[in-house]
Amino acid sequence: MSELITPEVRAWIGRVEPTPRVEVTRRDIIKYSVATGQRQPKYLRGDEAPPMFLFGALREIVPIDALGPDGIQTSSMMPELPLKRIMAGGTKTRYTRPVRSGDVLVGKRTLADIYSKQGSGGPLIFVVVEIEIETEAGETIMRETQTRIVR
């Protein structure tokens, strides 16, 4: 099974992609809060953003034809692999403080690991991406590890 992960694919481990710089406004937080049916006044006033606010806030705005069938932008963090069906394999997220109006956010995505396993239905490739979001001043907001399973 090690032949699934070639030296060229393995060379992707450690690749870093910066996220766009995002200035968070009270209006951004309020619009997101209303659109997602938030009920807590701190969100509806725009004092702080709900945790899932970050899910799309640091993604580039791209034309619709740059989105995959799942509606998510095609990632430059995914090497060409011999298996093609990509599934979510899990996410671990740790917030260290809420996002607030006036925060300027920066971050990076790092391809942390690629490995293979034999599943009951055949071979699987696991792609692990770590995401770190900070304020421009260097205060950590969130760390996340995403795993994609390719079969």
Image (tube, helix red, strand yellow):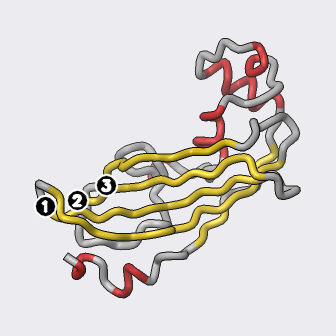
The N terminus - image quarter: bottom left
Residue at 55% from the left image edge and 60% from the top image edge: 130
Q: For the residues marked 2 and 3, what is the alpha-carbon distance in whole angstroms?
A: 7 Å
Q: For the residues marked 2 and 1, what is the alpha-carbon distance in whole angstroms?
A: 8 Å
- Please state which of residues 46 and 40 is positioned toward the viewer in this rendering: 40
Q: Is mark 2 on a helix, strand or loop?
A: loop
Disc 3 marks which amino acid? Ile
Callout in the foreground (2, 1): 1
Sequence-earlier tag: 1 or 3: 3
Residue at 38% from the left image edge and 44% from the top image edge: 70
Tell me the tag on residue 86. Answer: 3
List the residue tagged with mark 1.
122
Res 54 → quadrant: top right
CB-based contact (under 8 Å), mark 2 and mark 1: yes
Check the image and name the residue furthest to the bottom: 7
Badge 2 density bin: few <14, some 14–19, many ≥20, Cα 10 Å: some
Disc 2 marks which amino acid? Arg
Sequence-earlier tag: 2 or 1: 1
